Image (cartoon, coloured by chain):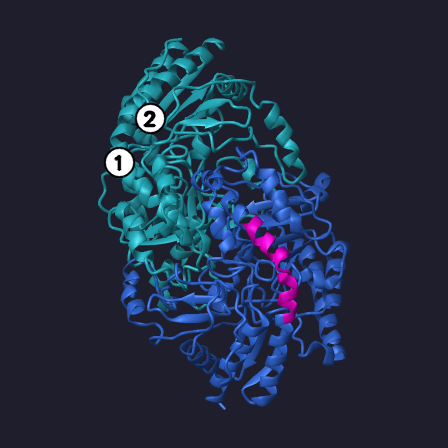
Chain colours: A blue, B cyan
Amino acid sequence: SKAAPQAQMEWDYDGPCMKTAVPGPRSMRLKQLGEIQNVDAINFFCNYEESRGNYLVDVDGNRMLDVYTQISSIPIGYNHPALHKLMADPNNLSTFVNRPALGILPPGNFADKLAESLLSVAPSGMTRVQTMACGSCSNENAYKAMFIAYRVSVYTKVEPGCPDLSILSFMGGFHGRTMGCLATTHSKAIHKLDIPSLDWPIAPFPRLQYPLEEFTRDNAAEEARCLEEVEDLIMQWRQKGRPVAGIVVEPIQAEGGDNHASADFFKSLRNIARKHGCAFHVDEVQTGGGCTGKFWAHEHWGSDDPADIVSFSKKLLTGGYYHKTDLQGYRIFNTWMGDPSKNLFLVEVLNVIRRENLLEEVTRSGKALLQGLYALQEQYPGLLSRARGQGTFCAIDIRDDPTRSKILLKARDKGVLMGGCGERSIRFRPALIFKEYHVALFLNIFNDVLAEFK
Amino acid sequence: SKAAPQAQMEWDYDGPCMKTAVPGPRSMRLKQLGEIQNVDAINFFCNYEESRGNYLVDVDGNRMLDVYTQISSIPIGYNHPALHKLMADPNNLSTFVNRPALGILPPGNFADKLAESLLSVAPSGMTRVQTMACGSCSNENAYKAMFIAYRVSVYTKVEPGCPDLSILSFMGGFHGRTMGCLATTHSKAIHKLDIPSLDWPIAPFPRLQYPLEEFTRDNAAEEARCLEEVEDLIMQWRQKGRPVAGIVVEPIQAEGGDNHASADFFKSLRNIARKHGCAFHVDEVQTGGGCTGKFWAHEHWGSDDPADIVSFSKKLLTGGYYHKTDLQGYRIFNTWMGDPSKNLFLVEVLNVIRRENLLEEVTRSGKALLQGLYALQEQYPGLLSRARGQGTFCAIDIRDDPTRSKILLKARDKGVLMGGCGERSIRFRPALIFKEYHVALFLNIFNDVLAEFK
């Protein structure tokens, strides 16, 4: 395979470097962790001290180009100098050492840090934000906010209590695994197995053909079918006495297989929500933070009023949700309600994104990545299909699940770390510092891997 | 009032020092945070840099003796030198900067850090631990683990799916506010208002008379009544087709009003759980970490097999739960699954607890505190009642809720920060470094406050 270009960032490595099979002997020994907790899902053990930029180093010294980034949660690569600089400033240490109960005793600089971090990237129409410790808690509390708002809207008609309300979600959606979230998660049956659920409506999510621009008519018909079903379900659940207080949707279904839909679909869905008095919740836990080439994936819809509530976590380093003014935060409470030390990091991450024009970089790298995937798909028609993506948030389907597993392992042995999603997709989730030369490097290795499966 | 003794730790302040009313003018200005999020529950804004040991300093320079400690979540006081030392070690920085997806790519030292931290204080009979990011996620996932274990236990008889199972909880219990947790939380109606719930059984928690040792016979009868009701509910819910997979209980109901029960009660409850094939989950989110004079409150029961699952958060700095080997961790998963930087802090906290014999200190301070509360209760019989506690985890009832509110504010103006719980209790939740001279100092000020209400 061709050598990759050499114009690396100073602190990045210049390519993968494999010393052992993965997991190597040290990782295998560390699997003694199995005496303490379940290790079935562990790939290998990492040396985070030695990891840098786009490269994850394992405990056996293997250095891999990371296009999965801790399930899409590392925004600007490993050990970014800006984050280390922050840690070296003694003024910041107290924020790490004294974690406050933010809902009652916030630090004096809390509003400023929110303004510098989360509010500086607030979605259109949203001036309010509530931090939480993780993505699941963000969605759980967003649902609560929607229930409370719904009850306020019909307040004169109801008795105080725990009402039978519901959240409408989509087949293939993933919103977390705590019990409220799990009732709206439908990406894999195994997530829900053995856990009690709630009788809430589940709408079909459009199953589109890719590239989207080549199948506009068929795709529009499929989206219309799903929207109609959404309205039917809202009516049915109202008749059941379990009205839909909110609709939750991902801008791109991630865990469920990187399923896209058009801007028109989401704008229509938002109108349906408004028409029926349901809050509209856009879950940007995986899509948010710049990986689609815009800071929020919903910005691609071109709407001034995209949502009532937008939740986030992962690349934002803290969980939480934005909401419109009329969705009150009252009664949303827990001990920590986030972690101000994560806001400190986020300020620096956003500075780096702006200073280095990373959204433009992502758009550029993303185009190169998608073009490369299209080319590989033509080259390996029986093996690859449905290449799709926005920014570097790309995916491609493999002919079947066992082949996907083999490809992921083979790529790892050659120094590229990727992840799967859906039934037979590979998802690409590089950091925002994944440049065009990383794309070229990746495509070369991926090509070498695929050649073995021809 | 008498002056407090002067033998402070070097890095602690020597007493409260009030400069303005609370909230002072700077705190009032910072309430502009209300433009970003709900600020109804905010007391004042803090200067965590200047806070030290048992003293919380606010942005107006007021220094308060803190017997509430961020809702019981600061184990060894503010800005403990041991925690700052940890931050000064460059070997630790990568752990803060690179947060891993622990379930798939843990750092090489993860098992060691778990062994040094959480496993070194594992409850009797428990060798396995799963970290989580907060208390709610800990309990949500503990419930899931109990559901999965229940299904395994009856596996040959069931079809795959989302079964109608339940968790039995207690009136007055608090286990968090995400939807699964909230279905088991019954401390205040406002927590549950407007949020859909689940049809799960709720048992009465004993309403005992204090001091416990003076009312043993009446209390035993009350506990027997509650235990009988637990068994009845287990039978009823089984007949309903919604069997009880687990029982969740706090060793001392905290948020619900510091309600204690005897060791016999808990041991009998544990036996009932075993008899009916329900997992027994002890929620030590608020009681764990040493404040009762033992590291876990359930150690006061003197049982070798106290529980199947023990959840924690707050003073442990990371959330999570311990469990017995036969409760499998498989299918318990999310992106972060905790935060290794919190484990680093916990290692140091545990070192300090051991080095400074803080459990003995807590026992000593707790005795002084409870004796002091007994004395005040005799002195102000119409105002105070039901003084109770274990270690420094103490509480006392005030004659009514409005008087409680006034006492809390008056104490704050005199430099003591306390919190309420239940309908009319004040709870004491000092850090583990709250010494006998802090107790004396506190009791003096509290006495001055109470004198104004005589």
**Residue at image location 29% in from the left, 29% down from the top:** B362
- Determine the chain carrying the residue at label 1: B
Query: Which mark, residue A88?
Result: none
Q: Which residue is mark 2?
A: B10
Tell me: residue B76, above or below residue B272.
above
Q: Which residue is mark 1?
A: B300
Dot 2: what SS? loop
**Residue at image location 32% in from the left, 30% down from the top:** B221
Q: Please state if B237 lies on the left or on the right of A373 as rendered.
A: left
Q: Position of residue A118 (x, y in %)?
A: 61, 48
Residue placed most toward the observer, B158 or B315: B315
Q: Position of residue A246 (x, y in %)?
A: 66, 54
A353 in the magenta segment: yes
**What stretch of residues is rendered in magenta?**
A346-364
The amino acid beneath tag 1 is His
Tell me: residue A385, above or below residue B213.
below
The amino acid beneath tag 2 is Glu
Q: Position of residue B42 (x, y in %)?
A: 57, 32
Magenta highlight: main SS = helix
